[in-house]
Image: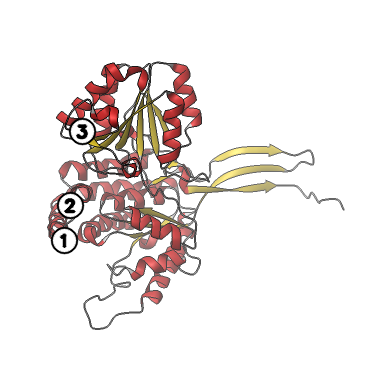
Amino acid sequence: MVDKFRVIEGGGEKRDMAQTMLELGREARRASRELAIAPRQRKNTALVVAAGLLRTSVADILAANARDMEAARTAGASKANLDRLMLNEARVESMARGLEDIAALPDPVGRVSATFDRPNGLKIERVATPLGVIGVIYESRPNVTADAGALCLKAGNAAILRGGSDSFHTSAIIHACLVEGLRTAGLPDHAIIRVPTRDRAAVGEMLKGLDGNIDVIVPRGGKSLVARVQEEARVPVFAHLEGIVHIFVDAAADLEKAKTIVLNAKMRRTGVCGAAETLLVDQAVAKTHLAPLVTMLLEAGCDVRGDAQTQQVDSRVKEATEQDWRTEYLDAIISVKVVNGLQEAMDHIATYGSNHTDCIITENARAAEIFLAQVGSAIVMHNASTQFADGGEFGFGGEIGIATGRMHARGPVGLEQLCSFNYRVHGNGQTRPG
């Protein structure tokens, strides 16, 4: 497969990119038709075999990743990007387990979600069907190769994966494991296609839709990538532009619980989209809760940028600017503000948030109920770390991305969100009267 679509990038003969990508899209479309009726067991076999190959190929994967990491460091990649790019044995094992978890999930294809019996004898069923061909454009995270390929496959979709140049070598080996799994299961190689070029023109061709052969695009990466996809795509997009994630410490918050949650939400992994970026503290508990929370963050190595009241807590707190409230740091930095109650907290989130993930910490059930109902984010939480904003943690076996739009897919995009549906009408000769 790689040879068929190989583009020579260093001079010499170079195939026309548009034609190359169009052929790739046609192959994916043909594979999608076979996948739409593929038995559950064959899809599961492909995933389990691929998981085993990830484990036996760990040395090769890590060697390729070391090569990509060195190139990224030389290019001046940020700490957050390096963390996303880096693999170790534990992360490879997590990828393998993720494939097995997806294999163990119920097959979403063919699930009947509703039935209607009409007075004229017609029986109508609403049945889950694959979307078709899903294009995934991503940066840094080589694990997306495994997660996206596996989720698309299980949901009966063909996938066209265009990873970033920074993870080029790592993704190639991960993809090879997936393809071998497909072959073992008797499924088409082109069910999961990796775009075998670093040429950015390939992204532009995907955004055009490959002559109708891509049904939806999922971008995973930085703000500039996602903005470009949302602006240029001629097909539907599942995406989030930023993860400006808030935690609101309510008047009825338990301090020790708040400290545990805030520290994990901010510092567990600062470069993930579910990391907390802004902490809001109710004025009613500012005297008891603000200083302990700010001191804890500072001592954990987090840069704190706060409003005037927060700055009074510790001389190390820097002044927060208007831009701080709008910033996804993806680093050990957090903005902190004291607000006058639940309504002001929700107003702040509505003004500065990105509809990704927001959390309230409170022992007041009514306050939690209001927050969960009125904050319009794809994921809203009560008394839990925002780092749980992840498809694997939701029991989806993984995610292809997190969508913050209001149509179809919202939150972690897992198997269910990678399906559409059709209506199947069963009759016995009925005709519609004039």
Residue at coordinates 33% horizontally, 58% vertically from top-left? Answer: 183
Q: Amino acid at mark 2?
A: Ser
How far across and down, in percent of the image, does residue 272 sit? 28, 42
User: Left or right of 45: which side holds 86?
Assistant: left
Would you call the spot at circle 1 few (<14 residues within 10 Å), some (14-19), or many (20 or more)? few
Task: Decide if residue 186 is in sight here.
Answer: no
User: SS class of the residue under badge 2?
Assistant: loop
- Rounded to the nearest angstrom, the CA distance separating label 1 from label 3 is 32 Å
Tell me the number on the disc at residue 57: 2
Q: Amino acid at mark 1?
A: Ala
Would you call the spot at circle 2 few (<14 residues within 10 Å), some (14-19), or many (20 or more)? some
**Which numbered disc, 1 or 3, marks the residue that appears first in the sequence?**
1
Camera-nearest residue between 343 and 24: 343
The residue labelled by disc 3 is 317
- Rounded to the nearest angstrom, the CA distance separating label 1 from label 2 is 27 Å
User: SS class of the residue under badge 3?
Assistant: loop
- Rounded to the nearest angstrom, the CA distance separating label 2 from label 3 is 47 Å
The residue labelled by disc 1 is 75
User: Left or right of 139: which side holds 216?
Assistant: right
